[in-house]
Amino acid sequence: DTGVSQDPRHKITKRGQNVTFRCDPISEHNRLYWYRQTLGQGPEFLTYFQNEAQLEKSRLLSDRFSAERPKGSFSTLEIQRTEQGDSAMYLCASSKGTGEQPQHFGDGTRLSIL
Amino acid sequence: EDQVTQSPEALRLQEGESSSLNCSYTVSGLRGLFWYRQDPGKGPEFLFTLYSAGEEKEKERLKATLTKKESFLHITAPKPEDSATYLCAVQRGGSYIPTFGRGTSLIVHP
């Protein structure tokens, strides 16, 4: 069990650029989540996959954000035309697909917008 | 809308000084309450799941309890390595998306 892996750990980019993050979940977990966390706040839900199906997206999620999980394995989160307010830690978590299973988090990608 | 309020926002303890963190919640049909520990620059690390009022779980110096309105994380004789932010999250029945609180930042001084 290698845990949830996220890449890159840090990303610095200029405003207006596109960025893409990758998440590799724990292998037997079929649920995958993306969260955003800013300083002093708890993780804020962005979107959720069960296998390859994207089942829910936050109403607060801008259409500049898109996520995929091809073949139900790794996932990518893309942010287009980045803005200053996108600066945050982006966390990925995975869980087993039965009942109220706890989520296991990666160490996140810290995004800084110049 | 589900709500989770954690208090205090920050807590400073001396090594060995026991205390409790509070997580008050409002959720329709609680199916699970989760406690996580988060170190700076890291993702949250799972500690406990509580499912029903009266339930208790323990791990080393930590003990989590649950009532119908709140959960407590009791820390007995803390050590400096217990310093971290502790997050509480609730999940309602029929949803697989937890709602997180803002966390309590704990610092334990040697």
Image (tube, coloured by chain):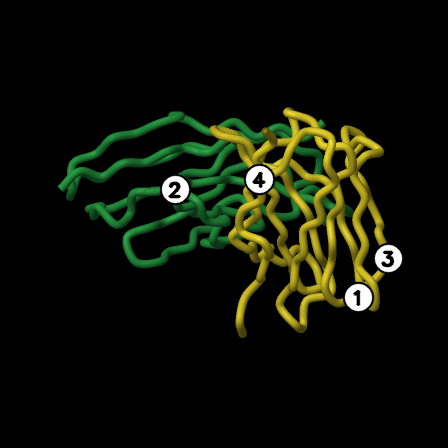
Chain colours: A yellow, B green
Q: Numbered disc 2: what chain?
A: B
Q: On the image, numbered disc 1 is attached to which residue? A: A72
Q: Position of residue A74 (x, y in %)?
A: 72, 64
Badge 2: few (under 14), some or many (20 or more) residues near its Cα, within 10 Å? many
Front one among A36 and A101 = A36
Q: Numbered disc 3: what chain?
A: A
Dot 3 and dot 2 within a common chain: no
Which label sits in the foreground, 3 or 2? 3
Q: In the drawing, does residue B105 fall left or right of residue A81?
A: left
Q: CA distance from mark 1 to mark 3?
A: 8 Å
Which label sits in the foreground, 4 or 1? 4
Query: Earlier along the polypeptide chain: callout 3 or callout 4?
Result: 4
Residue B73, numbered circle: 2
The residue at the point 81 percent across, 34 percent down is A64
SS at mark 3?
A: strand
Q: Are discs 2 and 4 less than 8 Å apart at CB?
A: no
Q: Which image quadrant is residue A79 in? A: top right
Residue A53, numbered circle: 3
Dot 2 and dot 1 within a common chain: no
Three-letter amino acid code at the position of disc 2: Leu
Dot 3 and dot 4 within a common chain: yes
Q: In the drawing, does residue B108 fall left or right of residue B72?
A: left
Q: CA distance from mark 2 to mark 4?
A: 37 Å
Which label sits in the foreground, 2 or 4? 4
